[in-house]
Image (spheres, helix red, strand yellow):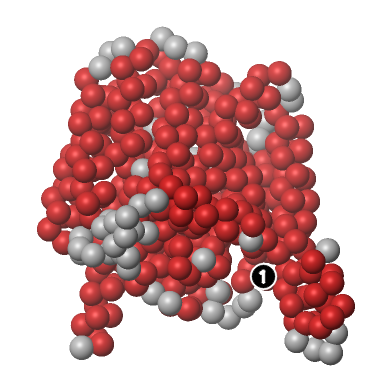
Amino acid sequence: MMEQMNRGSTFVLYLVCMSALFASLSQNIYSPIIPLIKDSFGVSVTMVNISVSIFILITAIMQIVLGFVIDFKEAKSILIPGMILTIIASIGCAITQDFTVFLVCRSLQALGTAAIPLIAATTIGNLFQGSERGKAMGTYQMVLSIAPVVAPVVGGFIGNQYSYPGIFWFITVISVILLWINSLYFPKGQTSKQEPIRIGKALSHYKAIFKSRVGSSILILSFVAFFLYFSMIVYLPIVLTDRYHLSLGIVGLLYLPMAFSTMLGSVFFKYIQVRKPLKSVLLWGNVVMASSVLLFAFTHLFSLVGISISLILHGMAVGILTPLFSTMITNEFEQQKGSAIGMFNFVRYMGMAAGPIISGFLLAFGNSSMIFGSMGVLYLVLGLFMMVRMYANQKRVVECKGNVKRECKKGMRG
């Protein structure tokens, strides 16, 4: 019986992983064709960046809306309608020749896929406990990291052969297949509660997350980490085509170092989290993240080798930090996993959405090396500060268990 339960949990794990992989694919396949979208619709780079950001922004907002709902309602009843909407929106993106209609359909596509990563992470949190949860989160992130490996190459190839409509027809076909599989096999009853949804209760969940030092620190770090990640990957095709005069196919291939190292980082986290304290993993993940941005800042204008090395380091950091943040926040909020993961996804998607817009504005008026260098230093300082903020309180709690309870209580109030 136990073996059957384990097999069932493993099957569901890979089912939600593949569904989330598709959601990531829909986002990452777009990056190499940014210059193609610009030329096909005759719009500015800023408008294309808005099309990137609006997808992420809508996905982010829906994490807040759906995160609390998933704590109380059946996940399948949210997943299936979302996938149907994705199919309709993808067809719209493929057939339109008007950029405004394209933006609307891309927005609807974001609405359709928004619930998938949230349902995946919450389902994993419900199925696994302790170090097994960390391993499952590592597996989830490892599967998810296939998208940055495959999507830019596929996007570059399809974009070269069939222009932008080919990419959205490809997404449509994958959506139909996943709709069929999830309709048949996604389990019912993936929630521990069946209660009326109340706005006041939702707000109390989110307030508790922000009041927690661990919760709020993870949210701040994840925002900045994914701000940096998307600032780099959206700027990358521009610098590679404008400065190095590379084709879209080659640009897609140059995403591979980051993508493979993201997968490697996820595998590394999966095994290191049972051997080392999460505090140590967080420290070194932050250091690698900051170092990669600094290296990119100082090499991207004159060295493809330097760009590749910085992307490898950056991918490693993203691969380690993403499942680490997910594990830490689900451990911290055991009874509100949907709300916690929803808020985590909201904040990191907001970072992704803000990255292309803010960095694009800064890069239009400033020196790119200076801007990325400043970002790297900022993340390093912020990462160290947030670690002190998270773990200093734990030190006081340990002291409270000794002979200094009165002084400790005083300090905690202060």
Position of residue 291 in the picture relative to residue 155 (left or right): right
Position of residue 134 in the picture relative to residue 303 (left or right): left
Position of residue 158 in the picture relative to residue 183 (left or right): right
* x then y, percent, for residue 375: 72, 40
Front one among 77 and 54? 77
Asked if residue 202 is positioned above or below residue 192 in the image, the reply reads above
Asked if residue 47 is positioned above or below residue 344 in the image, the reply reads above
Q: In this orientation, does residue 252 appear?
A: no
Asked if residue 19 is positioned above or below residue 335 in the image, the reply reads above
Locate residue 125: give its quadrant: bottom left
Q: Identify the residue at image location x=66%, y=35%.
A: 300
Front one among 82 and 276? 82
In the displayed image of the protein, which residue is found farthest to the top?
42
Q: Identify the residue at image location x=58%, y=80%.
A: 275
Estimate how packed mark 1 is, as few (under 14), some (14 to 19) or many (20 or more) residues with alpha carbons within 10 Å.
some
Q: In this orientation, does residue 384 appear?
A: yes
* x then y, percent, for residue 118: 39, 53
In terms of secondary structure, where does tag 1 sit?
helix
Q: Quadrant of the N terminus?
A: bottom left
* x then y, percent, for residue 169: 21, 31
Q: Quadrant of the C terminus?
A: bottom right
- Identify the amino acid type marked 1: Lys
Q: Which residue position holds label 1?
A: 279
Front one among 146 and 356? 356
Locate residue 397: give its quadrant: bottom right
Q: Identify the residue at image location x=84%, y=81%.
A: 406
